[in-house]
Amino acid sequence: MAKYDPASLKAEEFINDEEILETLEYAEKNRDNIPLINEILEKARPVRTEKGCTCRGLSHREASVLLSCEDKEIRERIYVIAREIKQAFYGNRIVIFAPLYLSNYCVNGCLYCPYHMKNSHIARKKLTQEEIRKEVIALQDMGHKRLAIEAGEDPVNNPIEYILDSIKTIYGVHHKNGDIRRVNVNIAATEVENYRKLKEAGIGTYVLFQETYHRESYLRLHPTGPKHDYAYHTEAMDRAMEGGIDDVGLGVLFGLELYKYEFAGLIMHAEHLERVHGVGPHTISVPRVKRADDIDPDAFDNGIDDETFAHITACIRLAVPYTGMIISTRESQSVREKLLDLGISQISGGSRTSVGGYAEEERPHDTEQFDVSDQRSLDEVVSWLMENDHIPSFCTACYREGRTGDRFMSLCRNGQILNCCHPNALMTLAEYLEDYASEGTKARGYAMIERELERIPNEKTRGMTKENIGYIRNSDRRDFRF
């Protein structure tokens, strides 16, 4: 039997079933151990220093104890600390992006996804490069600067060359004041050489959801196709790192397996990346199984309610304090609003989960991967964020200034990233307000900018930010960044 080893490159050793089961047993045994829980909470709390703020994070066992605790007062303390950590490292900024589905051709048999090969009544579609260009223009006209491209796994219809050509097309579209400044990629596990090609193409983060860390469930849920190989899929992030991609994004699809098992596996994966590569995941996503063509979420008996979902999110924030956390339009406005305070730092807005669809007035449904719960426009999402005192940020500066991987994490750990992110968020918000916002959103946005400018501690940086925002308001000059 494989032994647990977070430094191993073998999936069965760094995501070790025996270790997860022992962790769940330990967590259940200590769920009401208040002295231990107090120690764990104290360890998780951010510590202010002369150089900024630091966090120790939590081990998968410590975090699992917090997740198992059902005491309402303890949960509220977890939420308070999650808010403290979020504020310490990400402030009130929320990064905005949109998914762009390139193709739903897929050779896998995933039981939870309508793109599975045997689904004969979903319309199959693959965007041409000209169609991609039109989609990008539509996204730019909404105000987006950051995309996450998605495609099914199909070596014939969606080879790596198609993905690379698509990235080149996206970066090559310059429409009015619009540019897509960063493309993140969510495609199937692949070889090191292909990750090198993606890195050379200038991608931001490589995202790959594990779906489930439970090996037996994984094999059952992926009965056919290359994704059936649990080890190859689980070890993909190590190959991506070897290929030079130092920003990677993890995620499980909550609802497929028991959530406490998934949570422990997710934190163990983050620990593994930190141990082997010196940097944990750049992002962690928290999707839940949702209804889609030919997919009934009630068929999976491990669904979680909204309160449990919030508890999971907060515990992830305590365990992996420096990671960006993402919630998509799978979730409703009310759920997203609650989770923004508990750790979420990135959201999608104005999303369409069909192949293409942004260039069309009516939202298409025939090629959607899942139902979109939050169907508001980007302008409505931006305005809503500001109403709740969040700064909508379209910033992509860290990627383009080389602040990725361990460089980003070191700046984040000592709090210095705030000297870049806060002014960058305000400048990119000003771009949105000038070029795309409705009058009401514009007025609300500039009122927020005036307030937030005074929160920039460095006087020189504050002055430069004000000057740059003046250029944005009174000229076509764009893309200022620290």
Image (tube, helix red, strand yellow):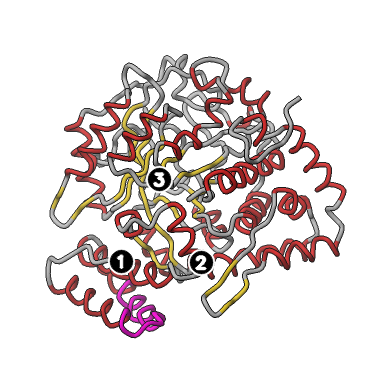
- Which region is colored magenta? 445-461
Mark 2 vs 1, N-terminal side? 2
Callout 3: 10 Å neighbours few (<14), some, many (20+)?
Answer: many
**Is 172 above or below relative to 181?**
above
Percent coordinates x, y for residue 442 in the rendering: 28, 70
The kind of secondary structure the magenta stretch mainly shows is helix
Q: For the residues marked 3 and 2, what is the alpha-carbon distance in whole angstroms?
A: 19 Å
Give the residue at mark 2. Answer: 89
Percent coordinates x, y for residue 364 in the rendering: 33, 34
Q: Residue at x 31, y 24 (%)?
A: 125
Q: Nearer the viewer, residue 57 or 174?
A: 57
Q: Is residue 23 left or right of residue 93?
A: right
Q: Amino acid at mark 1?
A: Leu
Percent coordinates x, y for residue 282 in the rendering: 48, 50
**Is 217 above or below relative to 37?**
above
Give the residue at mark 1. Answer: 429
**Is 228 above or below relative to 367?**
above
